[in-house]
């Protein structure tokens, strides 16, 4: 009988060791973007009409969409979009790790860019069963730009102010693993979309945390759109 109980205890410990050997762990850290000052206004030593006609002509042949144009109000409103938002906004950098036994996977990505990564969470007795999440993030940028053009005693002033709307759509797959690392079940993750809005020289903030844990993000304009529009106005 003693031998029987010893066998049971040994087998139980062995199974727990096997279970622990396959437990995965995830860690996450985030670095805020550095603030920058975007140059969004210039004065050109030319007549208002000359600059207006030049700018309108160049915008009409670019990827920008002209939504509204009123010469009497000296305003042009544009819209734009991109599937590579990281070229136009900086939303900081995320670093994730996924560890299982001696294997470790690192994921470093700009929050504004599309990315894929794995993460784990534990449940069950002693936390030796787990969910493994295979995350697929797809990012997209929509934006608007207001251009103001006005004559001054020193030439013509051109200023640009943009609004950037970053959308992040999250899809993926989650698997449920038992204590031996075998997959009991799997299902698709419900698609979710989050947004963060930033303006020229005015950062955007968001908190995408859950379960009482904050996850604050910050986005800034890199000044690429503003610079491109100002260059259209130059001779």
Image (cartoon, helix red, strand yellow):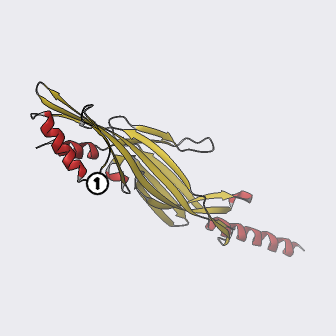
- Quadrant assignment for the C terminus: top left
Q: Residue at x 40, y 42 (%)?
A: 219
Residue projecting furthest to the right = 1
Left or right: where does residue 190 sit relative to residue 86? right
Question: Which residue position holds label 1?
Answer: 63
Residue 190: x %, y % from top left: 61, 58
Quadrant in the rendering for residue 108 = bottom left
Query: Residue at the spot x=55%, y=66% of the render?
Result: 101
Callout 1: helix, strand or loop?
A: loop
Provide residue 164's location: percent of width, then percent of height: 38, 44
Q: Nearer the viewer, residue 27 or 49?
A: 49
The image quadrant that residue 183 belongs to is bottom right
Nearer to the camera, 89 or 27 = 89
Q: Work out whether 76 lies above or below 108.
A: above
What residue is drawn where x is 47% and y is 63%? 105
Mark 1 neighbour density, 10 Å: few (under 14) some (14–19) many (20 or more)? few
Residue 211 screen position, x and y as percent: 63, 44
Does 210 appear above or below 11?
above
Relative to 44, is 224 on the left or the right? right
User: Dividing the image into 4 quarters, which one contains the N terminus?
Assistant: bottom right
Whole-percent x and y of residue 63?
28, 54
User: Is residue 220 something one can see in this rendering?
Assistant: yes
Q: Nearer the viewer, residue 95 or 104?
A: 95
């Amino acid at each position: 009988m003693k031998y029987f109980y010893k066998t049971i205890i040994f087998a139980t410990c062995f199974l727990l060791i096997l279970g622990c050997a396959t437990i995965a762990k995830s860690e996450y850290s985030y670095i805020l973007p550095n603030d920058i000052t975007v140059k969004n206004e210039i004065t050109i030593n030319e007549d208002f009409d000359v600059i207006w006609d030049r700018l309108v002509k160049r915008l009409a042949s670019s990827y920008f969409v002209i939504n509204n144009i009123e010469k009497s109000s000296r305003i042009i409103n544009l819209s734009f979009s991109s599937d590579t938002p990281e070229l136009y906004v900086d939303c900081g950098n995320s670093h994730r790790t996924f560890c299982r036994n001696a294997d470790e996977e690192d994921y470093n990505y700009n929050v504004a860019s599309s990315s894929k990564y794995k993460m784990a969470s534990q449940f069950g007795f002693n936390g030796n069963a787990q969910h493994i999440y295979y995350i697929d993030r797809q990012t997209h940028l929509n934006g608007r730009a207001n251009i103001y053009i006005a004559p001054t005693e020193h030439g013509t002033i051109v200023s640009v102010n943009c609004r950037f709307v970053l959308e992040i759509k999250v899809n993926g797959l989650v698997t449920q693993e038992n204590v031996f690392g075998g997959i009991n079940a799997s299902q698709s993750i419900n698609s979710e979309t989050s947004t963060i809005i930033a303006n020229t020289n005015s950062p955007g903030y968001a908190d995408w945390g859950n379960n009482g844990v904050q996850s604050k993000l910050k986005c800034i304009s890199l000044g690429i759109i503003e610079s491109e529009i100002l260059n259209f106005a130059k001779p």
